[in-house]
Image (cartoon, rainbow, N blue to C red):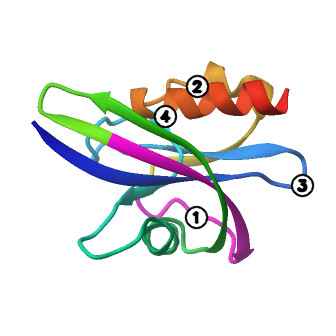
């Protein structure tokens, strides 16, 4: 079975809310929430991939701070290997270029969203670490 390597950014604002992105109808896993990011391209390291993806998807520049989780989720056709990182927005206001919606959500309310399965371990880790 094919494994897809992907990265996701956990961005926290001054109110301790986390930026969550709703996958659009044109994306696989439509209508699930995720941490924004995407596929790592051949020859690209994880941090560079995350910086590129956030620029493409949200129109913002970030600084990657530290790794949070490393999870695997198997679907019918692929294994998603997700690497999530704490990231800081250094320029630009995030806009939903590819997503249906962006929402800043308090950490304690993260589980109220319908998360993509690969992102749930990161949600759990954030709530354990920050609550």
Query: In terms of depth relative to the viewer, which is nearer, 36 or 68?
Result: 68
Q: Nearer the viewer, mark 1 or mark 3?
A: 3
Q: Is residue 106 left or right of residue 14?
A: left
Which secondary structure, mark 1?
loop
Q: Quadrant for residue 116, please give it.
A: top left
Name the residue tied to disc 2.
Answer: 113
Q: Compare marks 1 and 3 and give the one earlier in the sequence.
A: 3
Whole-percent x and y of residue 50? 49, 66
**Is residue 31 at least partly visible in the picture?**
no
Q: Residues within 10 Å of mark 2 (few under 14, many from 20)?
A: few
**Vertical position of residue 82 compared to residue 112: above or below:** below
Q: CA distance from mark 3 to mark 2?
A: 21 Å
Residue 58 falls within the magenta-colored stretch? no
Q: CA distance from mark 4 to mark 3?
A: 22 Å
Name the residue tied to disc 1.
Answer: 95
Query: In terms of depth relative to the viewer, which is nearer, 84 or 101?
Result: 84
Q: Are marks 4 and 3 in contact (CB under 8 Å)?
A: no
Q: CA distance from mark 1 to mark 4?
A: 20 Å
**Vertical position of residue 4 compared to residue 71: above or below:** below
Name the residue tied to disc 4.
Answer: 119
Name the residue tied to disc 3.
Answer: 14
């Amino acid at each position: 079975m094919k494994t897809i390597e992907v990265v996701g950014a956990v961005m926290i604002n001054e109110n301790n809310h986390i930026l969550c992105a709703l996958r659009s109808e044109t994306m696989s896993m439509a209508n699930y929430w995720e941490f924004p990011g995407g596929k790592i391209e051949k020859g690209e390291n994880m941090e560079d991939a995350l910086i590129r993806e956030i620029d493409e998807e949200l129109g913002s520049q970030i600084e990657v701070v530290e790794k949070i989780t490393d999870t695997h989720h198997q679907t019918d056709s692929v294994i998603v290997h997700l690497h999530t990182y704490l990231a800081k927005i250094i320029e630009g206001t995030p806009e939903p270029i590819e997503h249906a919606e962006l929402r800043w959500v308090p950490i304690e309310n993260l589980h109220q969203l319908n998360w993509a399965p690969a992102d749930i371990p990161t949600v759990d880790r954030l709530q354990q670490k920050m609550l």
